[in-house]
Amino acid sequence: MAGFIVSILTALGWATAYVLIIRRGFLEKTYGMPMVALAGNIVWEFLFGFFIREPGTEPNYVWVIINAVWFGMDVIIFWQILKFGMNEKWPSKRFFYSGIAIAVVFALGAELAITYQLSDWEGQYASFIDNLMMSVLFINVLYNRGVRGQSIYIAISKMIGTLAISVAYLVRYPSAPLQWYLSISIFFFDLLYTCLLYARLREEKINPLTRL
């Protein structure tokens, strides 16, 4: 029962974040997830949603469905990057599109290497490393281009979704120092980003609570 609740909280937290990122992207003709982090995200969901399974075990169909839904929403966000990416400050189209391709290729290589090196068939560490990178890059996006594509509800939804799965893994592996480091670091940067975004919205005379 506890595992089911964690799955629901994680799925709803991230799904809400994705939906709000997509909504704000269309409203402001931009993309709401940092490009490098999105490359890692979409590769992870593709690999663990459709291909990678622990040898000799049956797939967890709840997570297969969750990953498939996440992947579908990430495809829309990826399309928004391709459609609206040049609205942001990129040096050239060649630089921008080659950057996307390189990010996807290196994300694929990194996640496969982590999975097979650590026998991490659930994608636990690959997902948390990408998650930490995303948390830091959201702060970078905030300072580089302001609040375009962002909202306090996106930040909170991401934080709740990640916190739920973090607690689940820490209960399951209480002696795993890397999991503790990644979980605490992600929560720290998610909380920092939420506070910084809230302050920036107030500074720009935008009500953070009415901006969906």
Image: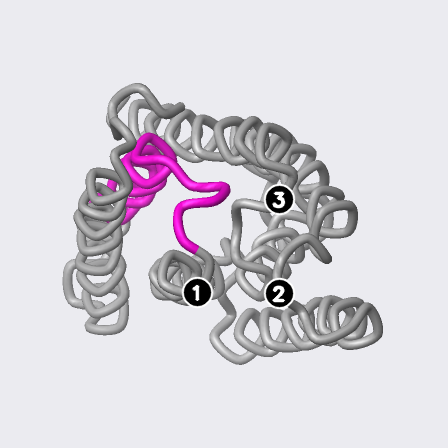
* Real-space CA distance between mark 1 and mark 3, rounded to the nearest whole angstrom: 14 Å
Is 90 located above or below residue 63 in the figure?
A: below
Type of amino acid at the residue the image marks with label 1: Asn
Contact between marks 1 and 3 (CB within 8 A): the answer is: no
In the image, residue 211 lies at what x, y percent? 36, 25
Dot 3 lies on which element?
loop
Type of amino acid at the residue the image marks with label 3: Thr
Type of amino acid at the residue the image marks with label 2: Lys
Give residue 72's quadrant in the image: top right
Tell me which segment is drawn in magenta. 146-168
* Real-space CA distance between mark 3 and mark 2, rounded to the nearest whole angstrom: 11 Å
Would residue 168 be found to the left or right of residue 85 on screen?
left
Q: Nearer the viewer, residue 171 or 26?
A: 26
Dot 2 lies on which element?
loop
Residue designated by label 1: 144
| Residue 89 circle label | 2
